[in-house]
Amino acid sequence: MWALVESGNVTQVYTRPKALTIGDVNYPSNIFMLWSSSELEAIGIYAVVIDNSNLKDKEYYINTNQSFAFKSSVTINSIDYTNVVVASYGTATAKPLDDVLWEDGDSDIPAGKSVGDVKTSGIRQGHIDNINAQAAGILQPTDWMVVRAAEGGTAVPSSITTKRAAVRTKANAMCTQITNAANVDALAALYVYNDATPPVRPLGELPQVD
């Protein structure tokens, strides 16, 4: 990625080589590949360095758009750069854990929505739904045994009954952990594996039904 810098300001960003006009001069797209850095800089084109220090997991945060600024000297991730354009992010905003509802006093309630309807969906319920879906997927191959037993057929083997109960118990416990997460960082931390062998996470794992 490159950027055009004029009078110290970034006026254009190029995500790929392209033909361009600077002043009265036309340049072909291959200058990005054939010219040296110093030759490009001589006409105002500088390499772009990405600063991800404010970039957060989009599962839990809403990141800003990148902003671009020319820096004569900058250090990013312990690497020193001179005469580069830095693409950086602003402060990320945490996504709501729980649904945000339209309230009295909201002046921008859209047509078809009323006070009490969901304005912004929270991410907590999605995580709970995902755990329940995973548990359902694990139980599904043996559901037929339960149906058969309920309809007067062969009883479900005790080993299967025990394992199915373990899946439901663990799923409920995992959903409780998610429900009790105080904020998005606490929710995200439930999924972080440690350095054990094998690695484990605070949320744990659903058992399998063989």
Image (tube, grey):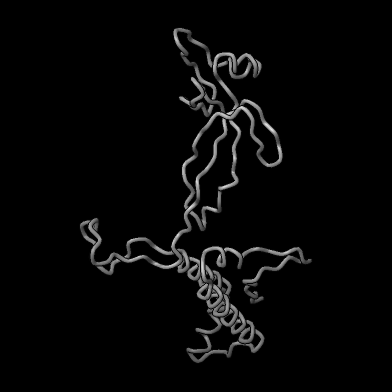
Q: Please say if 22 is above or below 83.
A: above
In the picture, the quarter occupied by the C terminus is bottom right
- Residue 97 image offset from top left, x and y in percent: 46, 66
Taking depth in this image into account, of 62 and 176 the one nearest to the observer is: 62
Outermost residue, left direction?
111
- Residue 123 image offset from top left, x and y in percent: 46, 63
Q: Residue at x 64, y 34 (%)?
A: 74
- Residue 106 image offset from top left, x and y in percent: 25, 61
Q: Residue at x 55, y 14 (%)?
A: 43
Q: Please say if 118 is above or below 142.
A: above
Outermost residue, top direction?
24
Q: Quadrant of residue 82?
A: top right
**Residue 140 can be seen in this image:** no
Q: Quadrant of residue 162?
A: bottom right
- Residue 57 image offset from top left, x and y in percent: 55, 53
Taking depth in this image into account, of 42 and 166 the one nearest to the observer is: 42
**Residue 18 can be seen in this image:** yes
Q: From the viewer's perspective, is 57 left or right of 38? A: left
Q: Residue at x 60, y 79 (%)?
A: 170
Q: Residue at x 53, y 72 (%)?
A: 181
In the picture, the quarter occupied by the N terminus is top right
Q: Please say if 142 is above or below 7.
A: below
